[in-house]
Image: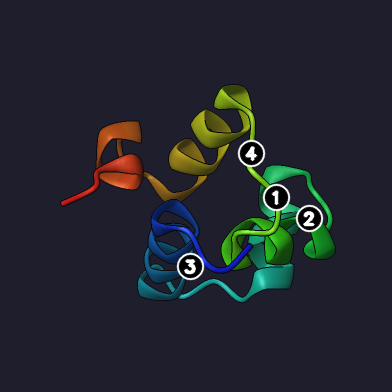
């Protein structure tokens, strides 16, 4: 499938905020493997999960999903 824009943005924001995949997955209540699949673009998160991720990263959903 390849990386998606939202997967790269989630990874970039997570790293910017100083979270490891393990730390962030634990914080938002998903497994590390699911987070990794999302970041690599192998899994598309539901809208609800995108909202949880955005909230966990303290960014808006628009920032997270922006195609710019």
Looking at the image, is mark 2 or mark 3 earlier in the sequence? 3
Q: In which quarter of the image is the N terminus?
A: bottom right
Q: Do the residues labelled 2 and 1 touch (CB within 8 Å)?
A: yes
In the rendering, which numbered label is found on residue 11? 3
Looking at the image, is mark 3 or mark 4 earlier in the sequence? 3
**Which of 4 and 65 lies nearest the eye of the viewer?**
4
Q: Distance between the residues labelled 3 and 4?
A: 13 Å
Looking at the image, is mark 4 or mark 2 earlier in the sequence? 2
Describe the element under mark 1 as helix, strand or loop. Answer: loop
* Residue shown at the point (35%, 33%) measured from the top left: 61
Q: Mark 4 points at which residue?
A: 45
Q: Distance between the residues labelled 2 and 1?
A: 8 Å
Q: Do the residues labelled 1 and 4 touch (CB within 8 Å)?
A: yes
Q: Distance between the residues labelled 3 and 1?
A: 14 Å
Q: Quadrant of residue 13?
A: bottom left
Looking at the image, is mark 2 or mark 1 earlier in the sequence? 2
Q: Name the residue under label 1.
A: 43
* Residue shown at the point (48%, 67%) measured from the top left: 11
């Amino acid at each position: 499938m390849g990386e998606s824009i939202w997967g790269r943005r989630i990874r970039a924001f997570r790293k910017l905020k100083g979270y490891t995949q393990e730390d962030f997955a634990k914080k938002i209540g998903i497994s590390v493997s699911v987070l990794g699949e999302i970041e690599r673009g192998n899994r598309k998160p539901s809208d609800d999960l995108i909202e949880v991720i955005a909230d966990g990263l303290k960014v808006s959903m628009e920032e997270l999903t922006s195609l710019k």
